[in-house]
Amino acid sequence: MDAVTTTDALPPWLYAPWERLIRKGREGRLPTGLLVHGATGVGKALLTRALVQALLCQRATGTEAACGECNACRSLAGGVHPEVLTLEPEEAGKEILIAAAREAIEFLGLSGSGKLRSVLIRPADSLNTNAANAMLKTLEEPPPGAMLILEAAQPARLPATIRSRCQMVEIPTPDYTEATAWLRGFADDASSVEEAYAASLGRPLAAREILTDAERMGRWEQDREALTTLLRSPGVTEMAARMQRSLPESLIPRIQALLVAAQRLLVTGEPDAFGRQFPRDLLEAFARQTGPRRLAALSAEAAVWQRQATRQLNPQLRMEDIALGFLRK
Ligand SMILES: [Zn+2]
């Protein structure tokens, strides 16, 4: 676990769910299964971490966040708290397998020193069927003090049996104004904030990373150059070579956003926030030459590329395939 989260670090749209959860938690009214759901990058992990930390903290009371100083907080910050386990896929985008789920279940069954033992499952929609079934038994007959906190961007992908045994907590997605107001706390100028928010595809926590982490910013700049090359359409070889410098999992969703921006420009005459990150004349020329029908078809193709984003495909062939798609009018 990372350093202890205080409520100062929580974005404002998490306040209301935070207060509800921490009140129930202090009164011992939280259920064994909690399913925290909301869009990617909205702050689910921030909230669940703050909740577990505050409940384990030896000093915090009421709706206070963890103090950050007591023994429990120190061991959480050091990542060694004996009552908390995070269950994640071995690699991003992969499934959580039964073996890992069994370890987590065993962990919950060990008798701890305290009143609460929790497992954070992140993202819960990556549990494979066997792993989900194993978790189901724990939800039905939980060991004393056990708490399972599931985080999911797509809760519908979880088995209905799991969902029905969890209390659902929805995290609202902040609108542009609320998200950018919060992001202004991390960057001085409004144009950087707008760029990061657009680059993150409207995911405020990812936007904050772009603003504060040079590597993320570098990856966005890399992707923007690749997309600009797609708009210029200098030919398959150059387009594919440029795209190969990007990571498919970050580039492909941005290609989708570019296609939406081009479609929108044709309909409204104005680029959206993502489209504004590119030279207007280039985007407009691309949109007009490609036309609404072909743009719609490309968007459908991009959805297929997106599903394949985390697969190990030959990178050159993959990028050539995308470049060819853009060149077909
Ligand atoms: Zn504390």
Image: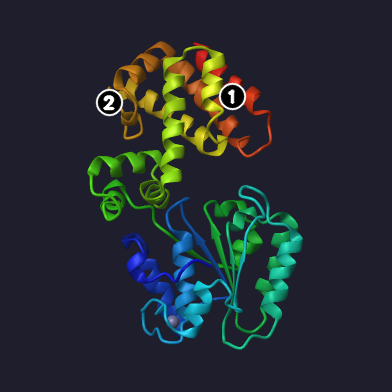
State which quadrant residue 270 falls in: top left
| Front disc: 1 or 2 | 1
Q: Is residue 10 above or below residue 285?
A: below
Taking 328 as reference, is 272 left or right? left
Looking at the image, which residue is at 37% across and 63% down?
14
Looking at the image, which residue is at 36% across and 64% down?
10
- Secondary structure type for disc 2: loop
Name the N-terminal-most of marks 1 and 2.
2
Residue highlighted by disc 2:
270
Q: Position of residue 307 (x, y in %)?
A: 61, 36
CB of mark 1 within 8 Å of CB of mark 2?
A: no
- Secondary structure type for disc 1: helix
Q: Position of residue 33 (x, y in %)?
A: 58, 71
What type is the residue that disc 2 sits on? Glu
Viewer-proximal residue among 151 and 213: 213
Is ligand 1 within 8 Å of the beta carbon of the residue shown at mark 1? no
Taking 73 as reference, is 83 left or right? right
User: Which residue is farthest bottom?
Assistant: 113
Circle 2 Cα neighbour tier, 10 Å, few/some/many (<14 / 14–19 / ≥20): some
Residue highlighted by disc 1:
319
Q: Position of residue 124 (x, y in %)?
A: 60, 58
Taking 79 as reference, is 274 left or right? left
Q: Position of residue 116 (x, y in %)?
A: 57, 82
Taking 64 as reference, is 85 left or right? right
What mark, if any, has residue 311 been given in the picture?
none
Circle 1 Cα neighbour tier, 10 Å, few/some/many (<14 / 14–19 / ≥20): many
Label 1, label 2: how far apart the Cα atoms are: 29 Å
